[in-house]
Amino acid sequence: MNIKKVHIKTWGCQMNVYDSQRMADVLAPLGYAETAEIADADVVILNTCHIREKATEKVFSEIGRMRVHKRAKEKSGGKMAFAVAGCVAQAEGEEILRRDKDVNMVIGSQAYHQLPEMIANWESANGKSRVINTDFPVEPKFDFMPAAQAARGISAYVAVQEGCDKFCSFCVVPYTRGAEYSRPAADIIAEVKNQIAHGAREVNLLGQNVNAWHGAGTDGKTWDLGTLMFHLAELDGLDRIRYVTSHPNDMHDMLYRAHAEIPQLMPYLHLPIQNGSDKILAAMNRKHTQDSYRRIIDRMRDVRPDMAFSSDFIVGFPGETDADHRATMDIVEYVGYAAAYSFKYSRRPGTPAAKAGKQVAENIKDARLQELQKKLYADQTAFNAAKLGLTFPVLFESRGRMDGQLQGKSAWLQTVNVIAPERLLGQIMDVKITTATQNSLTGEIVTIAPQSQPSIHAA
């Protein structure tokens, strides 16, 4: 088989990272191998994110930078396809084709399993075809995906849920990803087993609202995410389980129980609140309050005292006052986040909030964001500093930046750097922490034999 090359550039969330991996998998039977070099590629796929401001313009800018490689390929007698995939493609597909004649394919977030047919048509048309596919098929795309074609590393991603029914007033996800869909448990378990066979020791379960997963169980009953966790924990070779992103309204009893009883389930929860003001939360259509969020935090810490939390925040939402901003600062103070993502509100076309009055001035947004981030960064630094002198298990996933250095993750998702032999890649080792910064830890290995599982309360 003639080996062709595909270059995939990914923006956005971990679901996009997973989607890019699966696009590479679905193209492998056509003879396409991944390449990190754009100049070597026959097909270039931009897997896009529509969450941030000016997302569409960033796509056109990237295409402009890549165009020189396309022209060079054509001068040498070859051809190169530009494909735009993901959420920007889903939302702005017709505009992308209209504005840039070098784009050959636009593939929505629910259609990438149809990439082989689209690329085959492009090849048969000698590189002249232009096509858009942003349909929401009746059949789930997961039903048409092959098993993973290559090892995806020590820590693997597996999508279990996709789409969103929440319709937050600032968010485009329900329009670009569609309604909530939960994959059957048997399919998820099979994919996790396949990732373990390819060398994974940790799995990250993904979904726009991952804790809303309620799929068909292997016993004929409907399972929730907590129940799925218990079954995954029985798989030989799976040492760590994580999940992202959760919605406060989808927390459930079995999930709390899973955190209390499953040693493989890591003590880290990304639980976006977005804002601390009940007034703003209502305007966002979040359907939870600061008090209900605090009760989730308290209950999780009751069942798992070493639990760490991260969150997302939006400042300057339409109508936000100084008092609303203080409420956000209050919840940050209450929780003490290990990490967080924070942004200024930006209008997303087609969302209710984009049409709202009382837009907050940019200079006020800037000041509030700076105050918030100063506190969040200080809390992250303090969380890491609290690990100084402690010894706990670290899963080594990759080589570090320095010669002889390995990089791994703590149970709390902290990056940990250690001088260690390369043979320890993929192993879980006890590490004593000697240095802590805002973004990472450094330590020394204190055991020789690798551990099979982390302790249930490693702190």
Image (tube, rainbow, N blue to C red):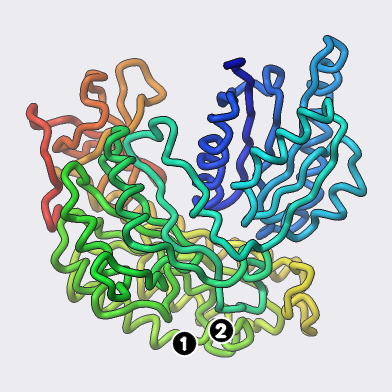
Left or right? Give the position of 400 relative to 358.
left
Query: Which quadrant, please, contains the C terminus?
Result: bottom left
Q: Callout 1: few (<14), some (14-19), or many (20+) C-alpha neighbours within 10 Å?
A: many
**Relative to residue 437, is residue 38 depicted above or below?**
above
Q: Callout 2: few (<14), some (14-19), or many (20+) C-alpha neighbours within 10 Å?
A: many
Which type of secondary structure does the marked residue at label 1 adopt? Answer: loop
Circle on res. 281: 2
- Looking at the picture, how far across and down is residue 367, in whole percent? 65, 66
**Relative to residue 321, is residue 139 depicted above or below?**
above
- Where residue 212 sits, quadrant-wise, is bottom left
Amino acid on which disc 1 is placed: Thr
Q: Which residue in the protein does label 1 denote?
A: 289
Q: Residue at x 56, y 78 (%)?
A: 166
- Looking at the picture, how far across and down is residue 10, in whole percent? 61, 41
**Relative to residue 432, is residue 273 depicted above or below?**
below
Left or right? Give the position of 306 relative to 376.
left
**Relative to residue 235, is residue 37 depicted above or below?**
above
Left or right? Give the position of 343 relative to 271.
right
Q: Nearer the viewer, residue 34 or 188?
A: 188
Spatial separation of the CA atoms under disc 1 and disc 2: 7 Å
Q: Residue at x 66, y 63 (%)?
A: 136
Earlier-in-chain disc, 1 versus 2: 2
Amino acid on which disc 2 is placed: Leu
Circle on res. 321: none
Number of numbered discs overlaid on the protein picture: 2
- Looking at the picture, how far across and down is residue 387, in whole percent? 23, 49
Dots 1, 2 in contact, CB < 8 A: yes
Q: Residue at x 27, y 69 (%)?
A: 226
Left or right? Give the position of 285 relative to 223.
right
- Where residue 220 sits, quadrant-wise, is bottom left
- Looking at the picture, how far across and down is residue 439, in whole percent? 41, 44
